[in-house]
Image (cartoon, helix red, strand yellow):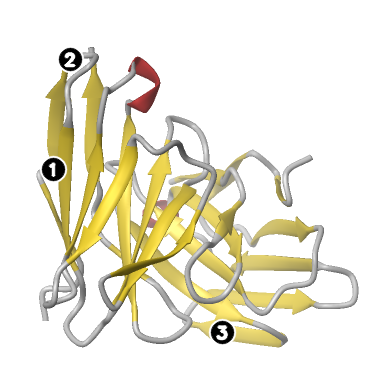
Amino acid sequence: DAGVTQSPTHLIKTRGQQVTLRCSPKSGHDTVSWYQQALGQGPQFIFQYYEEEERQRGNFPDRFSGHQFPNYSSELNVNALLLGDSALYLCASSLGPEQYFGPGTRLTVT
Amino acid sequence: KNEVEQSPQNLTAQEGEFITINCSYSVGISALHWLQQHPGGGIVSLFMLSSGKKKHGRLIATINIQEKHSSLHITASHPRDSAVYICAMGSQGNLIFGKGTKLSVKP
């Protein structure tokens, strides 16, 4: 079992651009959560997907959107990138209460 | 005020020392998580507990629901334990994280 995988590992974008990050959950997991971790801070919950629907959402603007596919993989899209969007984006999958984290995607906005 | 507070923020120890990291939270919870994050970002779940105590190898996690407090202990610390340790509250999704405790164990 490959565990939770994320792509790409690193990404550099310019202000105003759009970005798509991808996550493949651990085998058998049906729920995917996304988190943003700014440097020196704990992760902040963005949203969670279950059965291809957004089930919960944190305090993030509409520029942050997502999608879950029938195979439970998920995408995080961020539009109109700001410098402040530079962070590590973590995906976590779960079947029950315990979450398994991916290695993250490091996004740098210049 | 952050809903999850950790202390200390930074911790330096000598190899072999007993380590304690504390976590306090402000609201009732269904579960508390202890996680480990190494440089580069990957997060590993260490414990999820809702009462009592759990042990895994040299790691022990305790929780006191009445006092809204949890501790993570590392016995016989080793340089490979150097990492950021994060506590988080919540159950399925929507975890609320503390800012983490950066532990450095010197040989």
* Foreground of the two, B2 or A77: A77
Label 2 and label 3: CA atoms lie apart by 46 Å
Quarter of image, res B31: bottom right
The residue where tag 1 is placed is A9
Contact (CB < 8 A) between labels 1 and 3?
Answer: no
Q: Residue B77's x, y, as percent?
A: 51, 60
Q: Tell me the subunit letter for badge 3.
A: B
Task: State yes or no: discs 2 and 3 in contact (Cβ < 8 Å).
Answer: no
Q: Is residue A17 left or right of residue A37?
A: left
Q: Which residue is mark 2?
A: A14
| Amino acid type, label 3 | Lys
Q: Nearer the viewer, residue B50 or B95?
A: B95
Q: Amino acid at mark 2?
A: Thr
Q: How far is the residue under mark 1 from the one under mark 3?
A: 33 Å
Looking at the image, is mark 2 or mark 3 nearer the viewer? 2
Tell if the residue under mark 1 belongs to the same chain as the one under mark 3: no
**What residue does disc 3 label?**
B55
